[in-house]
Image (tube, rainbow, N blue to C red):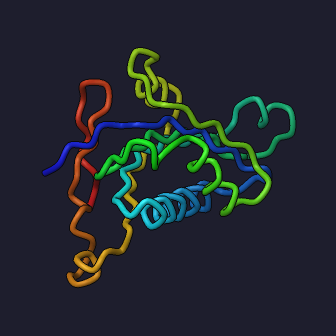
Amino acid sequence: MTVITPKFWVSPTWIHPVCLDSAIKTTKHYCNVLGKEFDTHVVCDAHYDVQRLRKLITNEDAPDAHLIIGFEDWKVGQINSQRLRDAWFNIMGFSIINVRTYDDTRFDGDYSFWNHKEYRSIHGCPHKQICRRRKACTFRHTEIKIDKRTFKLSA
């Protein structure tokens, strides 16, 4: 089993209110797009909740998400914040996304767990030949290491 070190903390925003299932599907699609674009498996620790302030003001259930993303094959220089933003814009069109380098001294992982009710482990597959040849992706039983803790991805 591989342990992936997180590289980015991503906070996407949905312009229009969507249900939680739709937000999760969009996140899965985003991870697969990143996997194909960078030709590597993507591991995402995703935390969801409702944007509380927006709910108070407009009574809309817009999702609030924080993603902690790591890569199987880390290519310094090829994978950067701007490319992660561009991939989100290509999927969602005009929207807002905050992408920064993951910093465990800022308690990025802890913040996501403290303030969000829904947790999902997501992985994006580049659909390499070895992943297509078998019943499922070979990377699905991977672990991601966050803040000196290890979370196993669900199958």
Q: Residue furthest right?
A: 58
Front-most of residues 16 and 133 = 133
Q: Residue furthest top?
A: 105
Where residue 144 sits: x, y (%)?
28, 42
Q: Residue furthest bottom?
A: 133
Identify the residue at horizontal 31%, vertical 31% (top origin): 146
Identify the residue at horizontal 46%, vertical 64% (top origin): 32
Where residue 135 sits: x, y (%)?
23, 81
Which quadrant is home to the C terminus? bottom left
> As displayed, is residue 128 above or below residue 12?
below
> As displayed, is residue 31 above or below residue 103?
below
> As displayed, is residue 55 above or below residue 36?
above
Where residue 56 sits: x, y (%)?
80, 31
Where residue 10 sits: x, y (%)?
55, 39
- Residue 20 appears left or right of 93: left
Front-most of residues 61 and 91 = 91
Q: Residue furthest left?
A: 1
Tell me where residue 113 sits by quadrant. Answer: top left
